[in-house]
């Protein structure tokens, strides 16, 4: 950016630098602080399984459909059953459809 008339190039460059430092400072609020429902403390665990994720996020579903669908999505195509990701995702969809049927207001 060119310095305005009457301003020295060095002074203008200094102002631009200082302005960029003010505007490019990272915010002090972390994403976890901004969206706390999406983040859970794991208390230093090095590994966590899908069942612990369900417990941390307090998934309450007596039918088990939501947990089953979540497991299928989180582990699609990598479980020992030999199903493809496509098949696992299709099963997750079918399970969620069943949950909707069980929980339909009418």
Image: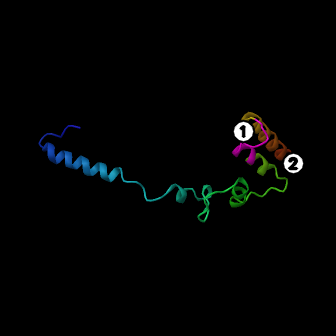
Taking the image as shown, residue 89 lies to the left or right of residue 63, namely left
**Observer-nearest of 6 and 35:** 35
**Disc number placed over residue 37 in the picture, else none:** none
- 102 over 37 or under it: above or below: above
Q: Report helix, strand or loop for mark 1.
A: loop
| Snapshot quadrant of residue 57 | bottom right
Quadrant assignment for the N terminus: top left
- Circle 2 Cα neighbour tier, 10 Å, few/some/many (<14 / 14–19 / ≥20): few
Quickly name the residue at label 2. 102
**Observer-nearest of 73 and 79:** 79
Tell me what residue is drawn at x 77 percent, y 43 percent: 80
Question: Percent x, y for residue 49?
Answer: 69, 55
The range drawn in magenta is 71-83
Tell me what residue is drawn at x 79 percent, y 44 percent: 96
Question: Percent x, y for residue 73?
Answer: 71, 43
Taking the image as shown, residue 85 lies to the left or right of residue 97, namely left
**Observer-nearest of 93 and 106:** 93
Q: Nearer the viewer, mark 2 or mark 1?
A: 1
Disc nearer the start of the sequence (2/1): 1
Question: Percent x, y for residue 98?
Answer: 84, 44
Q: Report helix, strand or loop for mark 2.
A: helix
Question: Percent x, y for residue 19?
Answer: 28, 50
Quickly name the residue at label 1. 77
Residue 70 lies in the magenta-colored region: no
Assign the magenta stretch its main secondary structure.
Answer: loop
Tell me what residue is drawn at x 69 percent, y 46 percent: 74
Residue 78 lies in the magenta-colored region: yes
Q: Are marks 2 and 1 in contact (CB under 8 Å)?
A: no
Between the residue at mark 2 and the residue at mark 1, the CA separation in whole angstroms equals: 27 Å
């Amino acid at each position: 950016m060119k310095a305005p008339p009457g301003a020295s190039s060095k002074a203008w460059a200094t102002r631009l630098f200082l302005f960029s430092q003010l505007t490019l400072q990272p915010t002090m609020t972390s994403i976890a602080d901004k969206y706390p429902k999406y983040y859970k403390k794991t208390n230093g665990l090095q590994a966590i399984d899908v069942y612990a994720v369900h417990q941390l996020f307090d998934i309450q579903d007596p039918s088990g459909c939501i947990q089953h669908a979540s497991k299928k999505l989180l582990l699609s195509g990598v479980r020992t059953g030999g199903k493809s990701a496509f098949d696992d995702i299709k099963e997750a969809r079918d399970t969620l459809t069943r949950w909707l049927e069980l929980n339909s207001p009418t």
